[in-house]
Image (spheres, coloured by chain):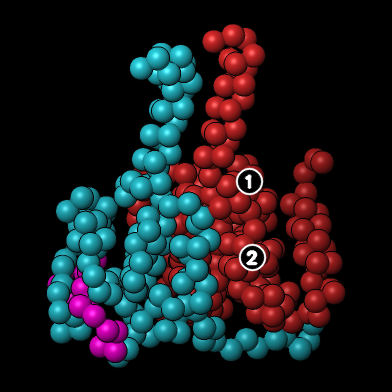
């Protein structure tokens, strides 16, 4: 085989390999199935609504909360600081657009469990280890955080801290969702500024 | 034979690639290409079925109980199998599901387990799989928000 033939054959091989490669737009999940199964079944992929309430109250910037519901549902009600990426949008676009940030823990929520669990399985299947769900969704948020009432006579320090976090998160939720859309973003920023002033200390 | 000798370098390169691609395409122990296509029923919610709707599914129904001691559900299907969730991809159970000719109903007391397993199985190319629930309104907002009118 002379050089020209070798070169032609090399190009042919390259073309064949490229033709056989799957279309990146139609990609599949990349992790091993059993690994994915183990990941999605272990409890470490779920946050409780109390944990999420804690992130919101503390203004934890290492957490990104993604609301998987429709834009209409999001406009009506949303968890403070969350961003809206409807489940169908997440599926129909490249999930990397929303998930490719390994410095942030991404928490999915929807009204219930299903949509966030599907999103979690897909995201973890694409090896986004920083993805989690808020267990129970917005319905559980209401049951636990918004409808939190203390009825006993004695309260332990731990219960008190939990109750306080729920109350603060509930107030933030009520405040932000009572505002018109145009004012919601301004409200979040003003809250963060106020919190910084209260904390005091050196800049 | 002369052609084989002449193009042995090319064959040596192309053949393993071809084998790998074929293995990837037709192997059952992998996720299928185009995750969107396999997740489609989750968008339309046609993958969720209630206990009342289950008998209307035609074909030989197989109930996969992901919790032990599920009482009263076995009558919904002609066949039933208790499967620990973390063992569902073992050859024994996965082949039962994959080779079953009728609808497969996944049941767990917590919807999160059946929902996540549904997605894993679907992405592996299993079709005709349903999540069996007591109601279909899991993704419906069930509370009433009272805005603060003083803000």
Chain in red colour: A
Q: Position of residue B87 (x, y in %)?
A: 23, 53
Tell me the subunit letter for badge 1: A
Task: Give the residue at mark 1.
Answer: A100
- Residue B13 seen in the current view: yes
Task: Give the residue at mark 2.
Answer: A89
Residue drawn at (84%, 67%), measured in percent from left and top?
Answer: A186
Q: How many marks?
A: 2
Residue drawn at (47%, 71%), measured in percent from left and top?
Answer: B42
Q: Position of residue B16 (x, y in %)?
A: 40, 28
- Judging depth in this view, the residue of A118 and A196 nearest the camera is A118
Residue drawn at (21%, 73%), measured in percent from left and top?
Answer: B62
Examine the rendered structure and indicate whether residue A142 appears above or below residue A47: below
Say which mark, if any, is on residue A193: none
Q: Which secondary structure type mostly characterizes the magenta part of the structure?
A: loop
Q: Position of residue B56 (x, y in %)?
A: 29, 89
Chain in cyan colour: B
The local crowd at label 2, few if under 14, some if 14 to 19, many if 20 or more residues have their Cα within 10 Å, is few
- Residue A129 seen in the current view: no
Examine the rendered structure and indicate whether residue A107 appears above or below residue B80: above
Q: Position of residue B86 (x, y in %)?
A: 26, 54
Residue drawn at (39%, 61%), measured in percent from left and top?
Answer: B122
Q: Same chain, marks 2 and 1?
A: yes
Farthest residue, direction top: A2
Taking the magenta stretch, the answer to whether it contains residue A149 is no
Q: Secondary structure at mark 1?
A: loop
Per the rendered image, the range of residues in magenta is: B54-74
């Amino acid at each position: 085989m002379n050089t020209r033939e070798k070169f032609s054959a090399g190009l042919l091989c390259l073309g064949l390999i490229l033709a056989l490669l799957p279309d990146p737009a139609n990609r599949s999940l990349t992790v091993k199935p059993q690994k994915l199964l183990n990941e999605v079944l272990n409890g470490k992929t779920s946050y409780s609504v109390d944990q999420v309430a804690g992130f919101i109250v503390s203004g934890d910037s290492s957490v990104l909360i993604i609301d998987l519901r429709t834009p209409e549902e999001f406009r009506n009600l949303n968890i403070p600081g969350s961003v809206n990426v409807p489940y169908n949008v997440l599926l129909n676009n490249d999930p990397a657009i929303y998930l490719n940030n390994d410095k942030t823990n991404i928490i999915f929520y929807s009204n219930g469990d299903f949509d966030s669990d599907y999103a979690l399985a897909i995201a973890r299947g694409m090896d986004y280890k920083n993805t989690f769900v808020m267990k129970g969704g917005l319905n559980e948020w209401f049951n636990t955080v918004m409808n939190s009432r203390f009825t006993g006579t004695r309260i332990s320090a731990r219960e008190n801290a939990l109750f306080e976090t729920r109350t603060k998160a509930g107030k933030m939720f009520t405040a932000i969702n009572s505002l018109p859309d145009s004012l919601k973003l301004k409200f979040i920023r003003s809250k963060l500024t106020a919190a910084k002033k209260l904390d005091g200390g050196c800049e | 034979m002369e052609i084989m000798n002449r193009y042995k370098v090319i064959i040596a390169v192309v053949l393993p690639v071809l084998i790998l691609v074929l293995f990837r395409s037709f192997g059952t122990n992998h996720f299928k290409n185009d995750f969107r296509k396999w997740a489609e029923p989750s968008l339309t919610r046609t993958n969720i079925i209630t206990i009342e709707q289950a008998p209307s599914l035609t074909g030989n129904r197989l109930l996969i109980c992901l919790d032990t001691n599920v009482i009263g559900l076995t009558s919904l299907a002609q066949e039933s199998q208790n499967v620990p969730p973390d063992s569902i991809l073992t050859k024994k159970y996965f082949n039962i599901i994959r080779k079953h000719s009728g609808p497969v109903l996944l049941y767990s007391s917590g919807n999160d387990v059946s929902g996540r397993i549904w997605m894993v199985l679907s992405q592996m190319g299993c079709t005709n799989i349903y999540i069996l629930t007591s109601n279909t309104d899991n993704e419906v907002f069930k509370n009433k928000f009272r805005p603060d009118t003083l803000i």
